[in-house]
């Protein structure tokens, strides 16, 4: 009889997943990076040096999209799918790749993220002020500059073809890859380990935000991670989180296409704290209401989701 990873202690599962993700990513990026270097003429060591990029050089855009692809396949997609394969005889079920328990969750998940935008923008201003007051300001600023430079190059070419490619390489790759990794695997493991859905959602959202290494946007991304985690847990379907994540990113890509100045904007349109606060409060109330609606319609129960792992012979291995 085959023994699956889900019957092992949570710490063992986490270490296995982290090790597998790092190992696969290193292999994929090493060989893929060499191919990318040959194709673009950009040295492997220079790919991460944003100050050496020439935005006018088409090879830089190709290089960036290539690294997005390598990250998607090597860090998010392959490790998540393989871990699910090792964990459950039905990997798709393990990852939550099924229809939501109620069709209304499709709309609720997308609406929650879009309604949260004023709150996200306001917390972004707050986050920026907090980082500027911290001793880590210089390092955080350099990381933010690197991310902004990459985003500017990718979104800087305004043709219909590039818009489609950006939707694929940014919105699709992030929506599918990050949700498989952070909600499909990480959140599932931490809910199981803590025996608390909301503890697992919060931990996964924290790691999701931290992973991006863009600390000027840490709090907003943490909030978005919470909403995505709640959408997955209450709907029982990872597809709702994937679709909501895609819709959120796609919206900003489309806005950047029609209003290029938003790519280099240092702050939201309403830069006054006083002007933004009422919108943020309304946004927070509406977002909380939508999460409450998700919870009200949900039949998700810890004992049901982890029923097989709650068998007497496995229960001792369930938590940390």
Image (cartoon, rainbow, N blue to C red):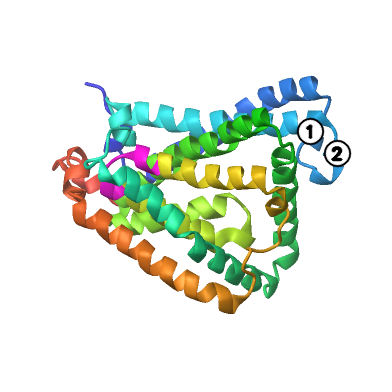
The answer to whether any part of residue 15 appears in the image is no
Q: On the picture, is 210 further left or further right than 236?
A: right
- Which quadrant: the N terminus? top left
Give the residues drawn in magenta, as a range.
Answer: 233-241
The structure residue drawn at horizontal position 59% and vertical position 50%, both measured from the top left corner, is 212
Residue on which the image places disc 1: 60
| Mark pair 2, 1: CA separation | 7 Å
Closer to us: 178 or 87? 178
Comparing 205 with 176, the one in front is: 176
Q: Quadrant of residue 116?
A: bottom left
Farthest residue, direction left: 312
Tell whether 286 sits left or right of 128.
Answer: left
Cβ–Cβ under 8 Å for marks 2 and 1: yes
Q: Residue furthest bottom?
A: 274
On screen, residue 88 above or below 263: above
Q: Is residue 104 visible?
A: yes
Q: Quadrant of residue 203?
A: bottom left
Residue found 71% across the figure and 37% down from its top: 158
User: Quick check: is 234 in the magenta stretch?
Assistant: yes
- Whichever of callouts 2 and 1 sits on the residue coming sooner in the sequence is 2
| Secondary structure character of the magenta stretch overall | helix
Q: Residue at x 54, y 67 (%)?
A: 123
Which residue occupies the foreground of this view, 55 or 232?
Answer: 55
Query: Relative to residue 208, is residue 12 depicted above or below?
Result: above
Residue at which label 2 appears: 54
Query: Quick one: label 1, few (<14), some, or many (20+) residues within 10 Å?
Result: many
The label on residue 260 is none
Across and down, in percent, residue 262 comes to 68, 53
From the viewer's side, name the closer residue of 17 and 286: 286
Secondary element under disc 2, as helix, strand or loop, is: loop
């Amino acid at each position: 009889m085959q023994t699956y990873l889900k019957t092992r202690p949570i710490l063992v599962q986490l270490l296995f997943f982290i090790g597998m993700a790092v190992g696969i990513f290193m292999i994929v990026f090493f060989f893929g990076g060499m191919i990318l270097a040959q194709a673009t003429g950009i040295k492997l060591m220079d790919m991460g040096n944003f100050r050496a990029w020439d935005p006018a050089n088409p090879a830089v855009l190709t290089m960036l999209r290539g690294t997005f692809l390598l990250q998607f396949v090597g860090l998010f997609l392959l490790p998540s799918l393989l871990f699910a394969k090792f964990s459950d005889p039905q990997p798709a079920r393990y990852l939550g790749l099924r229809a939501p328990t109620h069709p209304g969750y499709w709309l609720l998940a997308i609406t929650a993220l879009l309604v949260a935008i004023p709150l996200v923008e306001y917390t972004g201003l707050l986050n920026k002020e907090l980082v500027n007051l911290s001793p880590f300001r210089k390092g955080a600023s350099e990381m933010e500059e690197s991310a902004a430079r990459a985003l500017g190059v990718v979104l800087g070419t305004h043709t219909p073809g590039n818009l489609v490619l950006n939707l694929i390489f940014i919105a699709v790759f992030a929506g599918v890859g990050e949700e498989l990794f952070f909600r499909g695997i990480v959140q599932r493991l931490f809910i199981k380990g803590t025996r608390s859905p909301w503890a697992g959602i919060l931990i996964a959202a924290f790691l999701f935000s931290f992973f991006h290494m863009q600390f000027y946007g840490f709090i907003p991304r943490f909030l978005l991670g919470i909403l995505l985690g709640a959408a997955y847990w209450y709907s029982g379907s990872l597809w709702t989180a994937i679709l909501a994540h895609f819709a959120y990113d796609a919206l900003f890509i489309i806005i950047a296409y029609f209003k290029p100045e938003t790519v280099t904007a240092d702050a939201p349109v309403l830069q006054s704290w006083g002007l933004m606060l009422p919108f943020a409060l309304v946004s927070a109330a509406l977002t909380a209401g939508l999460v409450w609606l998700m919870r009200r319609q949900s039949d998700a129960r810890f004992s049901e989701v982890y029923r097989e792992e709650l068998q007497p012979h496995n229960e001792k291995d369930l938590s940390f």
